[in-house]
Image (tube, helix red, strand yellow):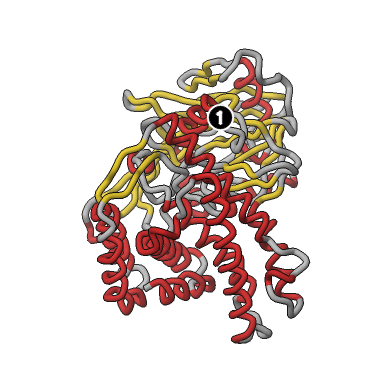
């Protein structure tokens, strides 16, 4: 039997120090990693030839300006096997020492056998040392479900259990209530039909505080990601010479239905968790601070600061604005199209913000702006590096964006009553905030995509 305890913690720490910063879910790209310490090794069980542990690791990062070390905590499920498996080779840790009992250590969420261990623990609603597996309803999760990882690696890792449940583990963890779990529970109490039902979650206590590690909800097998659906429309548009409204794959009706779904989720959250008023000045001051700070990462933003400040000043004139709990990081990748409706997923909020910041009420316009920016991305990213892209092509792409943005806002208005475009300056300020966030991300991760948000910043500012 594989015995994971034969691998020393010091050897794991050395391997993880090299491995974790290379993972897609590592949130501190561009920062220098100065330390890594394993703070918990929880054995999750074993099956023939494989055993699993759930690790919590603290990573020390060199703070800008030499202001000490800042810490981030991550969870790293690991698998331990005696023999290498071809499908797991690319997910192996670079261990300096192995033995005949444990020869391979790897990302456990890439192994169906290990995913099944998580599923069984959820089904039993058991506690495994310091990790508590919780169910919303007793006996709502079946035992014995095998799993598979879902799609490309993102800031979290999602796996499918038995083709009926989606289990998502939050890679970076922070003390406190995770908004993804919190808002799904609140929406369940309203009977909201635009989210997949929550079935369970994982939690632990670290340093005396509750920390949520992951959640399980219904897997919507017959659904398509909003990004994929929108891209099909864009490809159809760019393949011919028709206008967006005449294209065979016109997306406007879908955008309208999506706007209505977002407004319904906002209404349900407001009814369950309440609303309040906040001075617009507070919102726009925060936006301006982020725009100015982003210049350090994207120096080209400095040219747009005067115009951005003018936009912020106009938005500030709105006086007060309603705020409530919102999605917080809404875009086409955070929605699913089923045969009958749109579903919103991933209510965790913007990854760059702290957990407490993500739980703060905000204007619903932030979610609207996020979706408008996503339409812009969908329309323009296929043009990057295209030798066939012309001024006319970009103009047609811009008309696709405008048509679907209007349809989304019309759909939103049909449910909310108020038109988000009536607060044009404040909406534009939130769009600018999102575009600057995108510019920082692209500069650090995909420099060849930087032109997409920069084009929007020029337009907005």
**In the orientation shown, which residue stands out farthest toward the top?**
138
Residue 386 seen from this side? yes
Residue 11 seen from this side? no
The residue sitting at 55% across, 24% down in the picture is 43
Q: Secondary structure at mark 1?
A: strand
Q: Residues within 10 Å of mark 1 (few under 14, many from 20)?
A: many
**x, y percent for residue 385:** 61, 79
Q: Name the one closer to the observer, 19 or 130.
A: 130
The residue sitting at 29% across, 53% down in the picture is 283
Query: In the visual, does 361 lie left or right of 169?
Result: left
Q: Name the one closer to the observer, 156 or 241.
A: 241
> Height in image: 306 above or below 202?
below
**x, y percent for residue 196:** 62, 34
Q: Name the one closer to the observer, 166 or 194.
A: 194
**x, y percent for residue 317:** 25, 61
The residue sitting at 57% across, 36% down in the picture is 168
- Considering the image in quadrants, where does the C terminus appear? bottom left
The residue sitting at 49% across, 45% down in the picture is 416
Circle 1 is placed at which residue position? 53
**x, y percent for residue 393:** 64, 81
* Residue 48 falls in image quadrant: top right
């Amino acid at each position: 039997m594989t015995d994971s305890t034969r691998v020393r913690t010091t050897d794991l720490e050395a391997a993880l120090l090299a491995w974790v910063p290379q993972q897609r879910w590592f949130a501190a790209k561009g920062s220098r990693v100065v330390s890594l310490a394993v703070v918990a090794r929880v054995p999750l069980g074993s099956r023939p030839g494989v055993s699993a542990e759930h690790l919590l690791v603290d990573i020390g990062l060199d703070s800008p300006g030499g202001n000490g070390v800042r810490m981030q905590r991550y969870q790293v499920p690991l698998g331990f096997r005696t023999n290498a498996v071809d499908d797991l080779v690319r997910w192996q840790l670079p261990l300096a020492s192995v033995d005949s009992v444990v020869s391979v250590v790897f990302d456990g969420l890439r192994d169906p056998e290990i995913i099944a261990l998580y599923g069984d623990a959820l089904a039993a609603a058991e506690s495994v040392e310091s990790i508590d597996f919780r169910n919303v309803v007793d006996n709502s999760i079946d035992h014995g479900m095998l799993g598979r990882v879902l799609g490309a690696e993102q800031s979290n890792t999602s796996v499918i259990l038995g083709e009926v449940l989606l289990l998502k583990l939050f890679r970076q963890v922070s003390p406190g209530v995770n908004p993804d779990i919190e808002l799904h529970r609140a929406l369940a109490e309203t009977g909201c039909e635009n989210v997949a039902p929550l079935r369970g979650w994982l939690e632990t206590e670290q340093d005396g505080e509750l920390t949520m590690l992951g959640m399980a909800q219904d897997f919507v097998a017959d659904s398509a990601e909003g990004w994929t659906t929108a891209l099909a429309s864009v490809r159809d548009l760019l393949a011919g010479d028709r206008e967006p409204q005449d294209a065979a794959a016109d997306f406007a009706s879908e955008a309208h239905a999506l706007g209505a779904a977002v407004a319904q989720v906002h209404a349900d959250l407001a009814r369950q968790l309440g609303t309040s008023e906040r001075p617009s000045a507070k919102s726009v001051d925060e936006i301006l601070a982020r725009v100015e700070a982003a210049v350090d990462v994207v120096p080209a933003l400095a040219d747009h600061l005067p115009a951005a400040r003018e936009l912020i000043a106009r938005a500030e004139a709105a006086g007060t604005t309603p705020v409530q709990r919102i999605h917080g990081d809404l875009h086409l990748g955070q929605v699913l199209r089923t045969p009958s409706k749109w579903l919103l997923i991933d209510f965790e909020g913007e990854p760059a913000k702290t957990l407490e910041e993500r739980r703060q009420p905000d204007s619903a316009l932030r979610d609207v702006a996020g979706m408008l920016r996503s339409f812009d991305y969908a329309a323009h990213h296929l043009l990057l590096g295209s030798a066939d892209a012309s001024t006319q092509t970009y103009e047609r792409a811009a008309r696709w964006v405008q048509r679907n943005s209007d349809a989304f806002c019309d759909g939103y208005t049909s449910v909310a009553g108020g038109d988000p475009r009536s607060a044009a300056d404040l909406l534009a300020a939130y769009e600018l905030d999102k575009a600057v966030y995108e510019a920082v991300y692209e500069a650090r991760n995909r420099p060849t995509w930087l032109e997409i948000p920069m084009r929007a910043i020029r337009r907005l500012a």
